[in-house]
Image (spheres, rainbow, N blue to C red):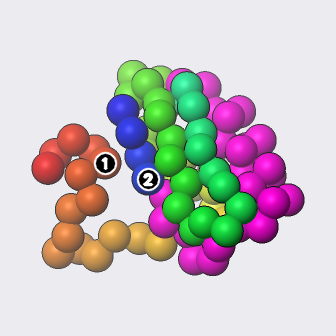
Amino acid sequence: MEHLLQLDAALDQPGADHILYWLRAIPGVNAVEANAGASQVRVLYDGDLTSSREIDITATRAGFPVRQARASGCCGACGGG
């Protein structure tokens, strides 16, 4: 599965390294793409082992608040479409 995190602010290089460290530590996360200058992080994960909610919570606890999708919009990350 794929999850795109929309962060409140763009990452600098130390921030990108930090969020990569924390998200890669989640069991079931297969790949993380986070680049300096970007405010979006791409995560590929096994939905049987973790969830987009767990990924969001981990990012927030690591110091990177995640923008929540508006209730009227669907980001498609859960596959519900």
In front of the other: 36 or 15: 36
Above-or-below relation of 48 to 52: above
For the residues bearing labels 2 and 1, Cβ distance under 8 angstroms: yes
Q: How many callouts does the rendering have?
A: 2
Q: In the image, which residues are magenta?
A: 5-28
- Tell me the amino acid under the disc marked 1: Ala
Above-or-below relation of 66 to 54: below
- Viewed as shown, does residue 4 lie left or right of 10? left
Instruction: Tell me how far mark 2 sits from mark 1, CA to CA.
Output: 7 Å
Residue at 53 percent of width and 61 percent of height? 40
Answer few, some or many: residues within 10 Å of disc 1's Cα (few below 14, many 20 plus, some between 14 and 19).
few
- Residue that carries the numbered disc 1 in the rendered image: 77
- Residue that carries the numbered disc 2 in the rendered image: 4
- Tell me the amino acid under the disc marked 2: Leu
Above-or-below relation of 57 to 26: below
Disc number at residue 17? none
> Which quadrant, please, contains the N terminus?
top left
Residue at 59 percent of width and 44 percent of height? 33
Residue at 49 percent of width and 58 percent of height? 5
x then y, percent, for residue 25: 71, 33
